Image (cartoon, rainbow, N blue to C red):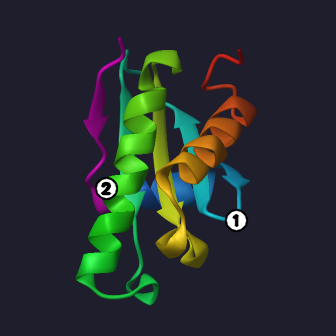
Amino acid sequence: MNCTIPLNENYMFRRLYHRGKTGTSPWVVVYWQKNRLSKNRLGITTSKKLGGAVQRNRVRRIIREAYRLLEPELKPGFDIVIVARQRVVTAKMPQVKKSLSGLLAFAKIESAE
């Protein structure tokens, strides 16, 4: 089982936005880049455009749970930033999980089944 640590420094987010690779879906945008660690680092971004604090926290919980369910299938050694898009506010967790799974498989972070 992989261990994921939080990505919580602003410079790390900015580095991924500028140098990382990108994948998009209607619900989320994923930026990723290899790191030199044996663990993944995850950051989640929710803009104020999504709504108030309650909506943004709900979105973060949904994305975190989808990632947690996919985590055992992920390869270690990546920095990942997930940016929530407007449509995710009304999305259900299985939709977000499927979308995230597809993006991580596209990024070759997830082992395709």
Identify the amino acid type marked 1. Answer: Pro
Question: Alpha carbon of mark 1 to alpha carbon of mark 2: how far?
Answer: 18 Å
Q: Residue at x 39, y 54 (%)?
A: 62
Residue 26: which disc? 1
Q: Secondary structure at mark 2?
A: helix
Any part of residue 24 in sight: yes
Q: Left or right: where does residue 40 sit relative to residue 31?
A: left
Q: Nearer the viewer, residue 111 or 77?
A: 111
| Residue under the image location 39 percent in, 65 percent down | 59
* Relative image position of residue 87 (x, y in whole percent): 59, 74
Quadrant showing the N terminus: top left
- Tell me which amino acid carries mark 2: Arg
**79 shown above or below 74:** below
Q: Which residues are magenta?
A: 1-12
Which label sits on residue 61? 2
Please determine whether, in this image, residue 65 is positioned above or below residue 108. Answer: below
Residue 42: % across, % down: 38, 42
Residue 26 magenta? no
The percent position of residue 94, horizontal first and vertical second, equals 54, 46
Kindly identify which numbered label has been placed on residue 67. none
Q: Is residue 6 magenta?
A: yes
